[in-house]
Image (cartoon, rainbow, N blue to C red):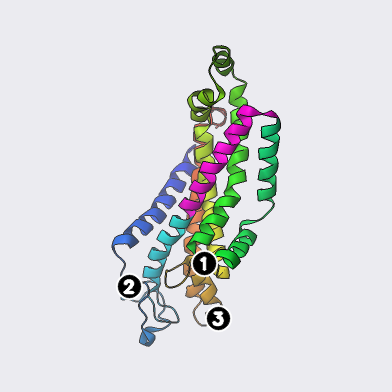
Amino acid sequence: MKRTALWLGAALTTIVVAMALVAQAWTPHAPNRMNMRARFVAPGDPVHWLGTDHFGRDITSMILAGAWQSLHVAVLAVALGLGVGVALGLAAAARRGAIDAVLMRANDVVFAFPAVLSALVLAAVLGAGAHTAVIAIGVFNIPVFARVARAGALQIWARDYVVAARAAGRGWLGITVIHVLPNIAGLLVVQATIQLALAILAEAGLSFLGVGIQPPAPSWGRMLSDAQTYLDRAPHLALVPGAAIALAVFGLNLLGDGLRDWLDPKLRRTR
């Protein structure tokens, strides 16, 4: 049972990814089609499996389409943070000295502003939308990846084979690409998986506040926001998107934890 978390996380993540991919080709109904004569249908209906909302929209279709929106924003945001953050962290570890100090202090400044606060500021400047969520969450991820990359790279720079490469005259960029980056790739994959879970949660929060994905595109967070008024009459309007968010975040967290145990030989030997 050593890899229970890995396999369970992979299974749950696969379900969420499958939902997103299926939504690109098929949904039971058009996610934004309104039918005022079918408002507040309860889950279990043969036509609307998970019921309908206050506009008569099919919740199953909205959940499927919302999975694509959440993953799309999360992947782009994490990719932005990963690309910029890893480059900064590797440069800081390789160059050290003043460059290291300046880059890390800049990361500290960025890290001091939460993604939600950054999104509110960006929304005031750029307008609310998916692009605002991607930039805000991505910028917040930059210092996370920078710190992880720097910490892992510093350990690799102290290894004998790196010292030998430096003695042989290889430059810092060549050593970083050939020796450092491949050896911290597993660490970055684990961190990216965890940040994906946080990005999905952040996107839902931003959409809940109205600065994330905008109508008519379906969004799990906005579904939760819309459900507040009707909790007494139709609690499934909040329970279904809430369960979808929990499934995605829980699955990715389990996957990250399982990957960490699998990729770290020290943890493998203790389990």
The residue located at (43%, 43%) in the rendering is 7
Secondary structure beneath dot 2 equals loop
- Asked if residue 180 shows in the view, the reply is yes
Q: Quadrant of residue 18?
A: bottom left
**Label 1: few (<14), some or many (≥20) within 10 Å?**
many
Which numbered marker is on residue 18?
none
State which tag comes first along the sequence, 1 or 2: 2
The residue located at (58%, 51%) in the rendering is 139
The residue located at (36%, 83%) in the rendering is 35
Q: Look at mark 3 in the image and give the residue it sits on.
A: 229
Secondary structure beneath dot 1 equals helix
Q: Residue furthest left?
A: 25
Q: Is residue 17 above or below residue 167?
A: below
Q: What predominant SS class does the magenta segment belong to? A: helix
Out of 181 and 91, give the one closest to the viewer.
Answer: 91
Q: Quadrant of residue 169?
A: top right
Q: Look at mark 2 in the image and give the residue it sits on.
A: 30
Residues shaded magenta: 74-97
For badge 1, the amino acid type reads: Gly
Q: Position of residue 238 (x, y in %)?
A: 51, 72
Q: CA distance from mark 1 to mark 3?
A: 14 Å
- Asked if residue 253 shows in the view, the reply is no
Out of 197 and 97, give the one closest to the viewer.
Answer: 97
Q: Position of residue 218 (x, y in %)?
A: 43, 69
Which numbered marker is on residue 221?
1
